[in-house]
Amino acid sequence: MLDPYNRHITYLRISVTDRCNLRCRYCMPEEGVDLMAHEDILRFEEIEQLVKLSVDNGVTKIRLTGGEPLVRKGIVELVEMIARIPGVEDLSMTTNGILLDKYASDLKKAGLKRVNISLDTMDAEKYNYITRGGDINKVFKGIDVAQKVGLEPVKINCVVRNSSDEPDALAVKEFCEANNLSIRYIHQMNLEDGTFSKVDGGDGGNCASCNRLRLTADGSFKPCLFNELGYNIKEFGQEKAFQMAIKNKPLAGTRNKSGRFNQIGG
Ligand code: SAM
Ligand code: SF4
């Protein structure tokens, strides 16, 4: 489907939960996180219907994100439900990788094509600091298993503070080159003050060619990460919420004073 600025909307990013097993400093506060009420979280059947509706309207590419998608109970089953929908050409996931060694094989069998795994540093202590408690060795294990089961290409999402030349970013690049991984640098963003830029090595952050729509875990279609607009299926109904999000997709992102990365899925 075309939005008012003639951009083809072909990519839906679905946040399947706002919960996470890490607390990255740039994404979530340490404590006092306002989590969505359990009864507001979309059921798998609802997500399935929404994917069908999106595919009927031109979406071909689905990414599951979060929060951490692998902490959503039954995630393999959800992948299976989405993968068998005719018209879903690409089904991927963005994960922190902590639980990936456990799930990679089942995810692959269920029809997941590929994964993006977040890794900002090669230093175990720094990783632990950034993520407030994460064990980098679990991520390495997850990467290894993902490659072994064929969730390819495995891409690494590396958040950089200033530039892709900073030491942590260079170390992650070296690791990627040595291990047949591709890397995307994402500049650390701030939703509230509207700081964002193009993703190096990816398609994000380029408003003129943005083909994305987002679905939050509690059922809001959001046309833009850097905008507060959102249309909840419980308020508008599935079809209208989807149509309104596309009809109101802004020409460019500005800022989002109320949104959080773990709720919208990055
Ligand atoms: N938990 C999963 C993960 O970390 O990969 C998926 C959800 S996370 C919100 C999706 C992506 O957003 C991750 O690659 C993460 O690094 C990125 N992200 C989170 N907060 C960010 C920020 N403030 N600026 C830029 N990227 C951010
Ligand atoms: Fe969790 Fe991903 Fe946010 Fe880190 S970036 S706190 S792993 S949702």
Image (cartoon, rainbow, N blue to C red):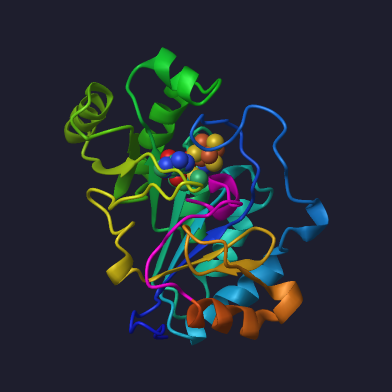
Q: Looking at the image, which residue is at 44% across and 74% down? A: 88
Position of 27 compared to 175: left or right? Answer: right
Magenta stretch contains residue 255: yes
**Can you tell which quarter of the image residue 118 is in?**
top left
Give the vertical position of 164 relative to 136 (above or below): below
Image quadrant for the N terminus?
bottom left
The picture places residue 19, in percent across and down from the top left corner, at: 65, 42
Position of 89 compared to 48: left or right? Answer: left
Closer to the camera, 56 or 188? 188
Give the vertical position of 260 relative to 163 (above or below): below
The picture places residue 33, in percent across and down from the top left corner, at: 69, 37
Give the residues drawn in magenta, as a range.
249-266
Q: Is residue 212 visible?
A: yes
Q: Is residue 102 visible?
A: no
The picture places residue 66, in percent across and down from the top left corner, at: 56, 49
Magenta stretch contains residue 192: no
